Each structure stands twice: as C-alpha cells, then as structure tokens.
Amino acid sequence: MNTQSQQPGKQPTTTQQQPSPSQTGARPLVQEQLAATDHLQPAAPKGDASQTPVVEGMGAIPLPDGGYAFRVWAPNATCVSVVGDFNNWNDTAHPLHSEGAGNFYGVVPEAATGDEYQFAIVNGDATFFRIDPRALKVTNSVGNGVLYNHADFDWEGDNFVCPGLHELVIYETHIGSFVDNGLDKPANIDDLAAKLDYLVNLGVNAIELMPLMEFAGDYSWGYNPANIFAVESSYGGPDALKHFIKHAHARGLAVIIDVVYNHFGPSDLSLWQFDGWSENDKGGIYFYQDWRSSTPWGDTRPDYGRREVRDFIADNARMWLSDYHADGLRLDMTPYMRKVDGFSGDIPDGWSMMSEIGWLVRENFPGKIVIAEDLHNDPAVTSAEAYGGNMHAQWDSQFVHPIREAITTSDDHARSVEAVSNAVTHQYHHSFDRVIYTESHDEVANGSARVTTEVDSANPDGWDAQKRATLGAALVLTSPGVPMLFQGQEFLEDEWFRDTVPLDWEQAWKFRDITRMFRNMISLRRNLDGTTPGLTGPVTRVLFSDAAAQVLVYSRETLDGNATVVAVNFARDPREVTVTMPYDATWKVRLNTDASTYSTVFGGHETFGFTGRTGQLSIGPFTATVLSAG
C-alpha cells in the first residue's frame, strides 16, 4: 500500500480519527462513557472463578470443561470487568483481578461460544467499554466481540504443503470486488470460493488475499484494520475463511494473507487510548506517544518497543499460519514500520519487529513464506543473517517500474533494452527472493491504471494495448523471481481498481483466448508439461541484447544446465536476430505470444526453432517467444 491507497471516505489522514461513539452491534453499549465507578472497585473473582486454575493466553480463552477465561492488558486501569450475553451486560458480575504487569484475569464459567462481549475498563472517574483487542470475531468494527473457539473447526485431511518459491505463481485478489454478487454489497469469501475452479484452471498455485481483518464499514481495500484478530464480518467471518483455505488447499492452491502492521485503523479503533491513558493526546498503550507515532494514516504506528505490543503483533502473525492454516503472510509497506515517513526517521524497533516476524515464520512454520512489500531495493530485507529482515521475498521495484515504463511508453524509441535486461536479471540474494509483476492493487489505482489503459486509454482493447500488456505478462512469467498477477489481468480488465467496482467478467469471455495465453504461460513457468524446467531454475544469463533492434534474449537454467530461452522483441515490427544458444540441441518453440489463436488482432508472425547451437530467430512485433530443447 502506498500513501494514497484508500478510496473516498478512507483516505489516509494526518490526524487521528477517534473511535465512533455509535454502536451497530446487538447491545446498547457505547465505546466510551463517563460514569460513577464505586461499583467497579477491584475485587477477587467470585464463585467458581477463584477455584479455577489459571490458564495461559490473552483475550478470550476457551476452557476444556466449558466457559471462558479472559485476560486483557490494561496497565493504567483501576479495575476491569468483562460484560456480555453471559451476564446480561452487568458490569459488576464478573470483575477481573490484577495479575501484575498490567494484566487482568478472570474466568466466566457461564460464557459460551457465540456470546457477545466487551471489557469494561475503569481509569479514575472514567469507564470505557472496549472490544477485546484479540477478539477472534466481532459483530462489526464498532460492535461487540463474539466468543469464538478455533478448536471447533474440523481441519481433518488438510495436509497441504506450500510450493517452493521457485514454483509459485501468485494471484493477488481483493475479496470484495472479485465478483458482482448482485446484492448491492461487497462480495464475500464464499463468492470468491465459487471461483476456485477458475483459478485452478488458470494454473496459478497461490492466492494472495488483500487484508481481510475487520475494518471500518463494509467497503475497503482492507488497509485500515480496526480489529486485526477478527476476519471482516461482511466477508463472512472466521469460519468462512477457514472453509475457503481448506477448499483452496484441496485444489492445490496456497493462500497468502496480506497483513498490516505499519499502522492500525485509523478509524473505529477500540485500541485507541485503550485503558484511558495517553501522552501528548496520542493513542495510548498500543501506540508510540511521540514523533514516531506519525504515519500517513494518522498517529497510529504501533509501539514496537513495548514487549506487549510486539507480542500482540507476533501472536497475530502466528494465528493466521497456525489457526487458519494460511501458507504465508505478505507484510504491507514495511518501510513505514522502520521509518517515520517511509524514507527517513529511523525506528530500529520497527526493523526488529519485521525481523522477528520473519524469524517466527522461518523457525516455527518451515515451508511457509513471509513476503515484504518494501520496494526500497534493500537486500537486507531478505537476508537471514544477523540484523537481516528474515523475509523470504520482497516486492521488487527494480522490476515493476522499468518493465511498466518499457511496455507503456508512447515513444517507441524510448524503450531501453538495457533497463529491461537489468530488471530481468536483478536479484537480492538468489533468484527467487523477489516478487515480480506489472499489475498490483497499487499499480492499477491512485492515478495509475491497468496496463492496457496506460498503453492506449482511447482504445484499451486495441492491438497496441493487447500486445504490450501480454508482452509484460510474458516477462513476469519468464523472469527469475516469484511471478504475481493481479485479479482480471489475465482477461485484460481495463478498469482501474476500486473496492466498489467488481471485475468485469464479460471481459473474461471476450478475451478468453488471451486468458488461454496466460494459462499457457503459467504452465510453462511451472514446467507442468516437463519441457521448460529452466524457468524454475536459479540461473539467468543474457544471450543477446541489441538496443537498436530492441531485442533481448535470455536463458533460464537449472543447476545442471537444462535451459529455457526467452526471446523478446520490443519493437512494433518483426525482428530477425542470430542467437547463440546455451548448447547444441534441437530448439523448439513452446510459446509465441503473437499467435493469431490468442487474438484476432494479432498478426500470427511465425517463429521457427532450429537445430544446432547458433541459429536465426524471427520474432513478431511486441512479442515474446519461449524455446527449449526437445
């Protein structure tokens, strides 16, 4: 997400928006009220609670024999109680006792899964009713928590193993806009699940879900999380996500969840001044109280220097991978974790927080992945050495910007083959520690558009737009790195991304042959037919580069030298070049993006293979050709 990644009504702010006092949940509670507090003085737990062994954990903790324990961190509270359906919202019925270190704890034997609840927190003369920061389910972002037990879900048979980075092809999607459900409300997780077979047929093997933590309202990109442990209620809540992941796994699809730890909110934040304390009129215990609090989304940067806040974030990361069986995390805009404005104002604790999450995944969830949206070309982000960021991969600015420039520029003579060559061969520590793409949720919004529209806004369905959009996709799917597509890219969606506008699935029928090209390219990238293992290999070599002819030829190779060769023509006319291949063989054409079977406007310029080590290739305009020995 960049600093403009919110739609109208959700724009980043420079001042904190206070939590709304309105309630749309089932109970007539307010987020904050002043009240007499004589009836909420500290007290020991009553009844069975005092006889129940203390259990570990934070938030609402289900007990083996029924009931729930509750623990909340509120170091500045005078006293705390839990209220809910189980005690008719009586704030004297179940006081929690102080355990020290700012934690309050108690047991409610009557509490049952599905009950709504909140914490009543007293600080001096003020009482605050707050959603549990670790609520696993909420009625909505200004409603109540809902008691939920992760252990109730049946994961039997879910033994999925995430593909390795060298095999991954990611499809980024936004749940609310993926389909039009015809209900005048955003699509939900079940709507997305109905398209799983489509994604399987497309050939991708990983779905990256834009943030689905509970956010303000029903429409959002998701980068304004109000309750980070709860799945967005309008999307279907926690069980819907679990069913989705289980079904995705059964179809061979990994699921990566986009998480936001560089800021919270900024609106509908029950965390804001959670226990009534703050300094400098800032956010209280969960947030920095000085200059480090400032973000493009208000004074809402978490205080990474407090162990309790670090545990809050680390436990959240752990939850998605453990309790939801997600296969990876994508951390939103990590520069804003470690720098005040993303570029300057160092926050060392933010760097160590990112590193801690990376280490947590590497150590506790081997085979699962963690990706940073960083875009600062910093090799330390994907380093597992001391003081490294421990990310498995990072979004790569050194690919997306030069490649988009090359395919969208209106000046045919301005394309730099050298810049494209550098983009293709760039790496940090190895060939697969970067995510490469030409379209993402940021690249196709906030003043930017889909590649087809950037190429020719007057005719995004025309020859130029089709040719150059597919050329860019071919570079994504044949270059070293983890390729990523954005929803609808495979059928040339030309609408810029908005959370209120569903994908135009009529385009999918109109450009079904373009989609077939994407399917064929993905198949080659994954070596599904066994003819292109080089595309999964770690070695990349430039075989031919000619700035005048605007042709680039590169080889992707396995460690044992099995090569796949990619020849790319950036000119609007065919080009003939003589190429020396990696070894003597019979070189067969596996893909030609100018084939007329992919589009009625394509010229169908034929590229022929040859036998030997040196031969001539004739490449169509704005075309990528893939060859391998056979």
Image: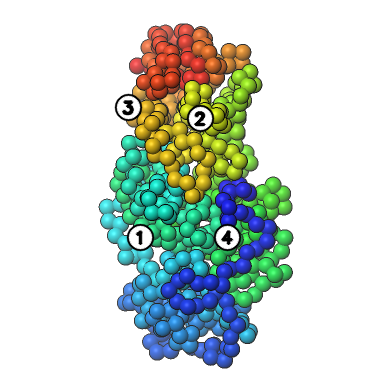
Q: Nearer the viewer, mark 3 or mark 2?
A: 2
First in sequence, mark 3 or 1: give its number.
1
Circle 3 SS class: loop
Q: Nearer the viewer, mark 4 or mark 2?
A: 2
Residue at (31, 41) in percent of width and height: 197
Circle 4 SS class: loop
- Badge 4: few (under 14), some or many (20 or more) residues near its Cα, within 10 Å? many
Percent x, y for residue 550? 58, 16
First in sequence, mark 1 or 4: give its number.
1
- The residue under label 1 is 239
Percent x, y for residue 492? 45, 33
- The residue under label 4 is 264
- The residue under label 3 is 529
Q: Nearer the viewer, residue 581 or 142?
A: 142
First in sequence, mark 3 or 2: give its number.
2
Percent x, y for residue 401? 60, 33
Residue at (35, 23) in percent of width and height: 531
